[in-house]
Amino acid sequence: MIIVLLGPPGTGKGTQAKAITTRHRLPHVSTGDILRKNLADGSELGLEAKAYMEKGELVPDHLILRLIDSRLSEPDASGGCLLDGFPRTRVQAEAFDGDLSAKGLSIDHVLLLEVASEALIKRLSGRRVCETCGKSYHVDFNPPPAECHCGGAIVQRPDDTEEAIKNRLKVYQELTKPLVDYYEAKGLLRRVDGDATPQEVEKRIARALGDPV
Ligand code: AMP
């Protein structure tokens, strides 16, 4: 099964991705996580992506398509995956559809997580993440401990600054939101209201996917 998780930054895609991948035993493929890992490792891709990521701009399509191609050819993705943060442009979506159809495959579901933009700014500016395991906290809603349960340091993502957040939301509106129509026209889109507790959103997603709740 191939599931695409779509939605502006801050809608809780990362948190929900973990719940969906556990339930469906799928690998969680997050292009943002892969890029951050490359950045931390100082790889060539990480160096190329750094400036775009820090400003909240999109990394060029050809780099992302290469990254996805390589990740999806790993054995754990042979039975499908959950894509979080990909595709993000029409070019990426069309290239991905082309690759899948060449393999006789197609996307099963596109889940759109929707949250009002004022709430997104609040969610993102208060977000703190563990540098080691990626667990997400929020200064008001889920205050982070001095140190993550895994022992990792709690940090603010460099693209969670006010300026980068505004840019990321603008980029979403301009480049990623058009994918809503693209997937709706294909009959794949399932809309989920993400303005609720993570547990409630998890149930809404399960219902949208036709899973037992
Ligand atoms: P995320 O963790 O999904 O919010 O991604 C963090 C950053 O990584 C984005 O703001 C982009 O700079 C970059 N990025 C992640 N996925 C993509 C993608 N599919 N296309 C272009 N840039 C991406």
Image: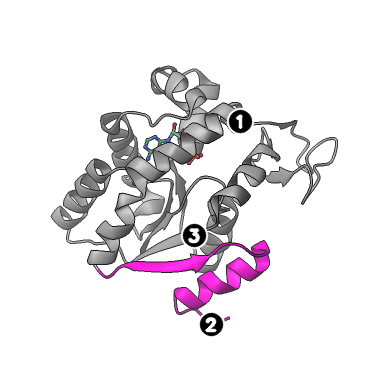
Tag 3, which secondary structure?
strand
Decide: marks 3, 2 in contact (CB < 8 A)?
no
Please report the bounds of the magenta region as a residue range.
187-213
N-terminal label among 3 and 2: 3
Label 3, label 1: how far apart the Cα atoms are:
22 Å
Three-letter code, disc 1 = Glu
Residue 74 visible in this rendered orientation of the protein: no
Give the color scheme: rainbow, by chain, secondary structure or one colour: one colour
The quadrant of the rendered image in which ligand 1 is seen is: top left
N-terminal label among 3 and 1: 3
Label 2, label 1: how far apart the Cα atoms are:
39 Å
N-terminal label among 2 and 1: 1
Q: Position of residue 140 (x, y in %)?
A: 79, 46
Q: Position of residue 213 (x, y in %)?
A: 58, 81
Disc ID at residue 113: 3
Residue bearing mark 1? 162
Disc ID at residue 212: 2
How packed mark 1 is, by other alpha carbons closer than 10 Å (few <14, some 14-19, many 20 or more), is: few
Q: Is residue 6 left or right of residue 13?
A: left
In the current view of this chain or complex, which residue is farthest to the left? 102
Three-letter code, disc 3 = Leu
